[in-house]
Structure formats: structure tokens, C-alpha cells
Amino acid sequence: MFSRKINGDTLRMCLAIPQYGDELYRLIDRNRDHLGQWLPWLDETQSPADTKTFISAELMKFARGEALYTLLLVHERIGGTLAFKSIDSQTGTAVIGYWLAEEFTGLGIMSKSVTEIIQLGKEYYDLKTCRISCAVENIKSRAIPERLGFHEKETLANAECVNGRWLDHIVYELNL
């Protein structure tokens, strides 16, 4: 199974497989309040089976070279996810998505992890461009691409509906 160290023995990313579904679901469920203000898919995630079904679908995309969905393991416990939500091999462009459980925020984990997945994308997917889309109001999420040298490409009005409210997104881009 794919696994990549990010920070010694304390932080690594690994390919999400259905066997992690129960643990990932429990983490999501414990963090519903924290994640619910920004992520629209929480309402669709009501059981470990939902999580396993999602992971299986992502593995099919991975097999076709269209996506890479990984788990972030902090001291061997799932702390969040990091993904190439889409990979366009024709243009060499990938869209990055991520989230962390509340207990792991503010520790530099995501900045290190996004740096690592970008490197992985250059090495294995011949990426030329990475994009990250964040809700305008999600200051913590926006700090990641801003810290890593992405530039603001555009702002999308009403890009996503979360809990009945429409969120504008800033799309960040990094040319590799």
C-alpha cells in the first residue's frame, strides 16, 4: 500500500482503503461541528458504510489516474485527509482538497502535507499546476495556499451550498 513519510515518524500520508472506513467515519462524526461549517458532504456521511463506499469510489478514480485520496496519519492515528480531488493528465493540473480534525489544527500539519503532495504530484503525475478552492470566510483553510506561495486566480460567487448557506470561494493556483 502507498505510504509516504512527511515528518519523520510522526506524520505520514497513506492511500485510503475501505479498511480505514470505520476509523475515518468515527473521526468525521466526532468533528461534525468543526467541519460542518465548510464541508457540504457531511450530511451524506451517516455511517461507516457511507465512508467505505466513498473510499471505494475514490480508489476507482485512483486506478484510472484521475484522483488520489489519502489519509493523514498523526502518530499512526487518522487526523484528516488530503487529496488530489481531480487530476487532469492532459493539462497537468490537479485540484487539492483537505481537512483536519479540530485537535490537529494549528500545528503546521497541513502546510507540510500539502507541500508533500505537491512534490508527489510533480514526481508521479508530471503536474504543472495545482489549484485549491477555499470558502472566502474559511481563514484557516485559506492560510495554507497563501503560506505556500499560491496566487489568487479568481473568486467564485455562490460556489458551494453548506447547511443552507451559499459560500463564495477563492481559487488559488500554483504553477510548478
Image (cartoon, rainbow, N blue to C red):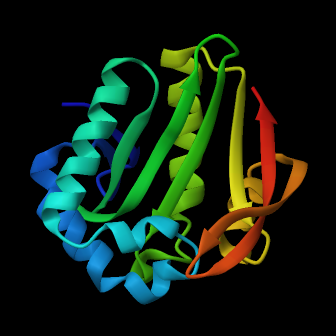
Q: Can residue 75 be seen from the camera position used here?
A: no
Horizontal and vertical percent for residue 101? Answer: 40, 75
Which of these two is toward me, 6 or 63? 63
Horizontal and vertical percent for residue 60? Answer: 29, 28
- Residue 73 location, quadrant: bottom left
Q: Is residue 116 above or below residue 140?
A: above
Which of these two is toward me, 104 or 55? 55
Residue drawn where x is 52% and y is 69% of the image: 39
- Residue 20 location, quadrant: bottom left
- Is 143 left or right of 5, judged from the image as shown? right
- Residue 158 location, quadrant: bottom right
| Quadrant of the frame with the C terminus | top right
- Is 168 left or right of 3, judged from the image as shown? right
Residue drawn where x is 65% and y is 10% of the image: 90
Query: In the image as oriented, which residue stretches furthest toward the front?
Result: 164
Q: Is residue 22 above or below residue 91?
A: below
Which of these two is toward me, 109 or 37? 37
Which of these two is toward me, 171 or 109? 171
Horizontal and vertical percent for residue 3? Answer: 28, 36
Horizontal and vertical percent for residue 78? Answer: 27, 63
- Is 55 left or right of 88, judged from the image as shown? left
